[in-house]
Amino acid sequence: MKEIDKNQIMRERLLQARSSPAKAYIGLTVGDVGLRRFLIYEFLTSVFGSMPGGLGFLLRKKLYPRLFKNSGRGLILGRNVTIRHPDKITLGNNVTVDDNSVLEGRGGGIVLEDSVVVNRNSMLLAKTGPIHLGSRTTIGSNCVLASLGGIELGKSVLVAGGCYMCGGDYHMDDATHAIMDQGAYSKGPIRIGDNVWIGTGAIILDGVTIGPGAMIGAGAVVTKDVPENMIVAGIPATVIRNRA
């Protein structure tokens, strides 16, 4: 079990902002990258981030790659994509991030390999652990991947809309104090193998490993490891059959 640094929790960072709002804003958006890179970030995201139509698409495609740690060719970014700590985000070739999505690399960083698709309104939040999506993986609309201990998806993983993956949890043993004040921890990363299909609205909890070729039923809550090629469903998720 890994304890999470309290100062890395967003709520704590926002509380600290009261003493120095400008410094806190820079820390939350770009981190310690220097004034020049901060000003470039502010200019590009403010002017082009919500620009509609083909012109906005072309300008983001041409100008935004300079924000990231690395960015391959063929990048497609929709309107109003929120990007935080882009210096910790690596994008492969032909990556697509649709409208109103969030990429936040402030903790462990984000890697999106070739041909990854993140559909609209989805959030990839590398809070204190990394997020790594293998090539040709697709994240459906309205999904949340929030990483405290790490989230790793293999190649050609299909995640339907409205799914939630949370790589972390809170201590709750002391009933005399608010849970949010007792500290966070991680049991380990969420690991999802190649060619997995995760159905609509599924929830994958901290420390779970899902083997290659498995299928997770819609609305399932996965609390323990899923072997290779197994179909699971229910709350909590249980094995239905082997699809091999």
Image (cartoon, grey):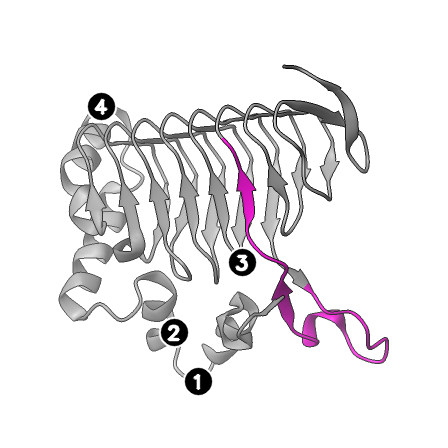
Looking at marks 3 and 2 on the same chain, the residue that comes earlier in the sequence is marked by: 2
Instruction: Specify whether 28 is left or right of 148.
Output: left
Which residue, given by chain and number where applicable, does mark 4 sit on?
Answer: 54
Q: Residue at x 29, y 42 (%)?
A: 49
- Do labels 4 and 3 touch, CB within 8 Å? no
Marking on residue 239: none
- Which residue, as the protein is rendered here, is positioned at the far top? 244
Query: What amino acid type should be assigned to the residue bearing mark 1?
Result: Ser
**Element at label 4:** helix
| Viewer-closest of 115 and 237 | 237
Between the residue at mark 4 and the residue at mark 3, the CA separation in whole angstroms equals 38 Å
Looking at marks 4 and 2 on the same chain, the residue that comes earlier in the sequence is marked by: 2
> Can the viewer see residue 217 in this picture?
no
Between the residue at mark 3 and the residue at mark 1, the CA separation in whole angstroms equals 29 Å
Q: Residue at x 50, y 53 (%)?
A: 150
Instruction: Specify whether 187 is left or right of 220.
Output: left
Marking on residue 24: 2
